[in-house]
Amino acid sequence: MDVCFFGGYDSGYPRNAVLRRGLALNGVRVSECRVRPGYKFWLRYPLLLSGWPRQSPRTPGGFIFVPEFGQKDVPPARLIASLSARRLIFDPLASRFETKIVDWSWRPEGSLAGWWNKAIDRWAFRLSDLIIADTRAHKDYYCRRFGLDPRKVVVIPVGFDDRIFSRGLAGQGGELREGKPLFTALFFGSFLPLHGAEIVIEAARLVWETDKSIRFLLIGSGRTFPAVQKRAADCGLENVRFVSWLDQAALARRVAAEADLCLGIFGRTEKAGRVVPHKIFQSIALGKPVVTARTPAVEEYFSHGENIFLCRRDDPRSLAEAILRLKSDSRLREGIARRGHELAWEKFHPAAVGARLIDVLGRWR
C-alpha cells in the first residue's frame, strides 16, 4: 500500500504529521507532492501538477491524500487520481463554511462569502472517494450539512506526535513546592472562538477570590487574544500570565515542566461541541490531567473522572470549581492523569491511529 500526501499544506501541522508517521510506522510507503501553504491557486495548481510525476510512487493504484484545510486542493488531486487509478482521500478536519462563517462570524451565513465557502466544501466532499472526520459528531455534521452518504465518511482521532509529546517528557513538573504558589492551570492554543479562552479568564477571576495559590498560564495567540488579555488586565488578575506562541517542541517542554493540569476548550460555538483538539491528546500524552467542557465529541473518547475531568460548557463557575476540586484532591488528579496517559499511549499514539486508517483504506482498495 502507498499513500501520497498532496497539496499546499503545512507538513508540521499535527494532524497530517501524526497520520504520515502512523502510516509509516505500519509499513505503508508514504510520499509527498507538496508546495508551501499560502500560494494562490493559479500558482499552486501548476506546481502541484508538474511536481506529481517526480513525487508519485512508480506502482499503479494506491491513494492520494489531501490533508487538513485542503478543500481547494481537491480538484487537481481528483484529476491526478482519475488519471493514475488511485483513490482520493480527503481529511478536511473542519468545514470552511463552519470555520469562517459560523465559528468566526467573518460574514453573514446568507452572504456571497457564505455561499462561496459552502460551495467549496461541497465540491471538495463530492469529488473525494473517502472523507475522514476526527469525531462522530463531526461526521454527523458533514453528512447533515452537505448531504453525504455516511458510508463515505470515517472517523479517525487526531492523536498526538510521540516524537514531540514524548514519554521522556511525561511526568515532569506538576509538583507543588513548599512556600511557592506553583499550582498551574495551563491553557495553550490559537485563541479561536471555540477554545473559550474568555471563559478561562472568568474562571481565573473566580479562583482568585477563593485560592490565591493557583496561577493560570496562557500560551499562544489568535483571534480572541487581545480581548482576553484586556479582560485579564481590567480585572487586575495577578494570577494570570500570558506567553507568546511557542514552537511545538518548546511548547511540549513548557507544558511538561510547568502544568499541574491542562485546560481544553470551553467555547459556546456549535463547532466546540464537535471537536476534540490536538491539545487534549497532547496533554494527556504528557501525563497531565485535563479539564475541558463536556461535549458529545469529548465523550466519544474519554470518560469523566476516569481519564478526564469535565465541566459545564460556557460556564466559568463550573470550570473554577473543577480546578479547585482537582487542586485539593491529589488522588483524583493523579488518577485521572495516570489513566489518561495510559489511554493516550494505547489508542492515540501515531502507530494506533495509523493502524486504524490502514484498516479503513484496506476496505476501500
Image (tube, helix red, strand yellow):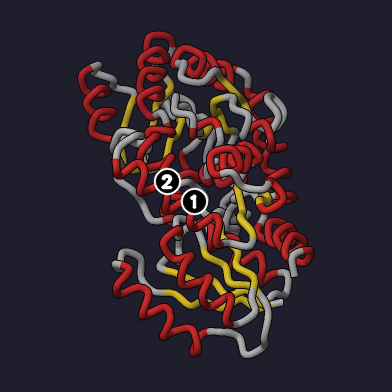
Of residues 189 and 89, the one drawn nearer to the viewer in this rendering: 89
Image quadrant assignment for residue 309: top right
Q: Amino acid at mark 2?
A: Lys
For residue 273, which numbered disc appears in the image? Answer: none
Query: Percent position (x, y) of residue 246?
Result: 36, 51
Above or below, comparing residue 309 to residue 34 in the picture:
above
Q: CA distance from mark 2 to mark 1?
A: 6 Å
Quickly name the residue at label 1. 122
Of residues 157 and 124, the one drawn nearer to the viewer in this rendering: 124
Q: Residue at the location (48% across, 26% down)?
A: 178
Q: Is the Cβ of the residue at disc 2 closer than 8 Å to that at disc 1?
A: yes
Q: Amino acid at mark 1?
A: Arg
Q: Which secondary structure lies at badge 1? A: helix
Asked whether residue 2 appears in the rendered view, the answer is yes
For label 1, the crowd category at 10 Å Cα-Cα, with few meaning under 14, some 14 to 19 and many 20 or more, is: many
Q: Residue at the location (65% across, 79% down)?
A: 85
